[in-house]
Amino acid sequence: KENYDSTCMEPVHFLPLIPMACLNPQSGIGVGFASNILGRNPEDIIDNQIAHLKNKFFDNPKPCLIPINQYSVGIDQRKDKERWVFHGEIKILNSTEVLITNLPYKLSHVDFIKYLNNLIEEDKISGYEDDSKNYYKITVTFKRDMIKEIGQENLLKYLGLINYESENFTLI
């Protein structure tokens, strides 16, 4: 009651309308309706909400998954459908070693290690050393000159460090 002013019809407090579905990534299926919503940076959401309230132009922010430090690196257009592109982070150490410091969105550490084991079985890499604790630190060893043959631009794809995500929001 202390914030109530009978002479004024303006609200004393402002409750912002922030679309929570855009902040927290969600995916699932229920009663035949599938949804896949990628998270956004909270600062981008707030800036867009303010722009909307002021009748200004606002842009659709790129997906951003802050806890795992993942940002969408672009959009892939296929069959009239937009797909967001995520990729891991690598650093070429020398002619035979690559350091992996981040995995793409939705690729678990366990699944990636299984993928590396398959690459060893198929004789596509020599081996790897996983020193990950709080951060990813996976050193992959290739045969001599193999990194040069694959090419820097194809190395992420070769290591399975590219992921495509399509958004789908079904509302009844």
Image (tube, rainbow, N blue to C red):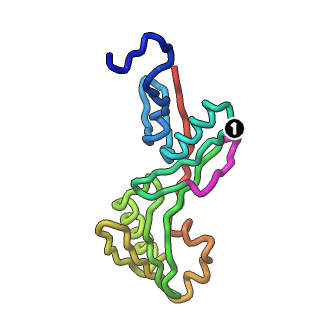
In the rendered view, tell whether residue 135 sits above or below residue 148.
above
* Residue with the most extreme left position: 133
Query: Can you give x and y, in whole percent of width and height, for residue 82 in the image?
Result: 64, 44
Task: Give the residue pinned by disc 1.
Answer: 57
- Residue at 49 percent of width and 27 percent of height: 33
- Residue at 50 percent of width and 50 percent of height: 64
Residue closer to the observer: 158 or 35: 35
- Residue at 53 percent of width and 27 percent of height: 170
Q: Amino acid at mark 1?
A: Phe
* Residue with the most extreme front position: 7
Highlighted magenta segment, given as a residue range: 72-81
Which quarter of the image is occupied by the N terminus? Answer: top left
Query: Can you give x and y, in whole percent of width and height, for residue 25 in the image?
Result: 44, 42
- Residue at 44 percent of width and 81 percent of height: 141
Magenta stretch: dominant secondary structure? strand
In the rendered view, tell whether residue 149 sits above or below residue 58.
below
Q: Callout 1 environment at 10 Å: few (<14), some (14 to 19), or many (20+)?
A: few
Query: Can you give x and y, in whole percent of width and height, for residue 104 in the image?
Result: 47, 59
Query: Can you give x and y, in whole percent of width and height, for residue 80 in the image?
Result: 70, 41
| Left or right relative to 157: residue 135 | left
Residue 108 within the magenta-colored segment of the rendering: no
The number of discs equals 1
Residue closer to the observer: 78 or 91: 91
Residue 80 within the magenta-colored segment of the rendering: yes
**Secondary structure beneath disc 1?**
loop
Please tell me in which quadrant of the rendered image residue 134 appears.
bottom left
